[in-house]
Image (tube, rainbow, N blue to C red):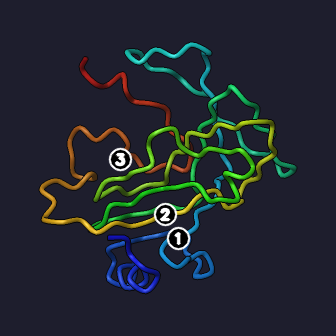
Amino acid sequence: MILSDKRILEEIENGNIVIEPYDRKCLGTNSYDVHLGKHLATYKNRVLDAKHHNEIDHFEIPEEGFVLEPNTLYLGVTLEYTETHKHVPFLEGKSSTGRLGIDIHATAGKGDVGFCNTWTLEISCAQPVRIYAGMPIGQLIYFVVEGEVETLYNTKGNAKYNTKTTKPVESMMWKNSF
């Protein structure tokens, strides 16, 4: 079950959902619009290795915008810091973003109960497109969890993305054993 606008407001009031900064105008019927932060990153190497730490270069989106190019993975970040203590948050692209040929995540659209951070975006595009810091980039949808959660994400000892950040975070796959 997806939370409605009224239910999202109730959960914000109860402290179960935190969105900073929060703007009531960004609340949709059953979602909350999030915006692109000012930082992007690209991997230093063109060939990535899942067993090794792949380093990234961070840069700020200039005021005149930045042109995304096809065949390049950009890591972005939401302007909004969020906390979700009782629900499963899903980050989806906005239809207006998709109609520009922009994908905001390759596979990581679902957060976990207890996720407390900005969202790293895995941005790719179908054709060159200019983007801007602060532009609407996606929407958060909140799902009800059935049953009690044993371990919240922010209390897991092996959680890889718990460090609060305003910049995109590279893949931590290399920390897994395989």
Evaluate if marks 1 and 3 touch, with contact meaning CB atoms under 8 Å apart: no
Q: Residues within 10 Å of mark 3 (few under 14, many from 20)?
A: some
The disc, 1 or 3, on the residue closer to the chain's N-terminal end is 1
Could you tell me which residue is drawn at 31 percent across and 53 percent down?
A: 112
* Residue 142, above or below 98: below
* Residue 161, above or below 150: above
Q: Amino acid at mark 2?
A: Leu
Which circle, 1 or 3, is nearer the viewer?
Answer: 1
* Residue 57, above or below 89: above
15 left or right of 150? right
Between 128 and 56, the one lying in front of the other is: 128
Which circle, 2 or 3, is nearer the viewer?
Answer: 2
- Label 3, secondary structure: give it: loop
Check disc 2 and report the residue beneath it: 140
Q: Residues within 10 Å of mark 1 (few under 14, many from 20)?
A: many
Evaluate if marks 2 and 1 touch, with contact meaning CB atoms under 8 Å apart: yes
Q: Quadrant of residue 85?
A: bottom left
Check disc 3 and report the residue beneath it: 162
Residue 141 position within the rendered picture, expressed as x and y whole percent measured from the top left:
44, 65
Residue 118 position within the rendered picture, expressed as x and y whole percent measured from the top left:
49, 54
Q: Amino acid at mark 3?
A: Asn
- Kindly report the distance in space between the C-alpha atoms of the residues bearing marks 1 and 3: 22 Å
The disc, 2 or 1, on the residue closer to the chain's N-terminal end is 1
Could you tell me which residue is drawn at 39 percent across and 51 percent down?
A: 110
- Kindly report the distance in space between the C-alpha atoms of the residues bearing marks 2 and 3: 19 Å
- Label 1, secondary structure: give it: strand
